[in-house]
Image: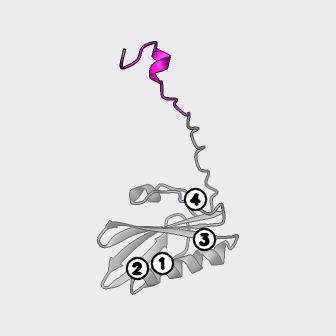
Amino acid sequence: MGVFTFVCRESADEWTAKQLSGELETSAGSTYELQRKLVQAALSSDSSGAVQSSFSYITPSSAVFQVVVGGASGGAFIGGGGAAAAAAPAGGAAAEAPPAEEKKEEKEESDDDMGFSLFD
């Protein structure tokens, strides 16, 4: 599984992106085109499975884009968005999701269990 994190900036009607920890970079006229190019660049480095991506604006002219290649589908995003994505591992490092907490079912107590009734 590969995780690629990019810092994106707009300047003079062109978006540029540089990998946070690595050498991948590209530029494009729109964020949509930039995201497509970055996914292709990530796939050229690691084509081990499904692709998930997340684009989060930080300011109107800057953003963080993250591409996750491989791993389980559904919920494998490293960062929820914004600056949290920038702190995630990048450049093909394996990322571990924290273990899910077990939910304990709470049983509602009935009036019978308390020894009295509402109508007594």
* Amino acid type, label 3: Val
The answer to whether the residues at label 3 and label 2 have Cβ atoms under 8 Å apart is no
Instruction: Identify whether 34 is placed above or below 72.
Output: below
Tell us which disc is closer to us: 1 or 4.
4
Residue located at (38% from left, 68% from top): 63
Query: What's under tag 2, amino acid-wise?
Result: Thr
Q: Which residues are magenta?
A: 105-119
Specify the amino acid type for callout 4: Ala
* Circles 1 and 4 in contact, beta carbons < 8 Å: no
Task: Name the residue located 63 percent from the left edge and 76 percent from the top edge.
Answer: 43
How much space separates mark 1 and mark 2, taking CA atoms? 6 Å
Q: Which residue is mark 4?
A: 76
The residue that mark 1 highlights is 35
- The quarter of the rendered structure image containing the N terminus is bottom right
Sequence-wise first label, 3 or 4? 3
Give the CA separation, mark 3 to mark 2: 18 Å
Q: Which residue is mark 3?
A: 51
Would you call the spot at circle 1 few (<14 residues within 10 Å), some (14-19), or many (20 or more)? many
Earlier in the chain: of badge 1 and badge 4, it is: 1
Nearer mark to the viewer, of 4 and 2: 4
Give the mark toward the camera: 3 or 2: 3
Magenta-span inclusion, residue 102: no
**Of the image marks 1 and 3, the number of the one nearer the N terminus:** 1
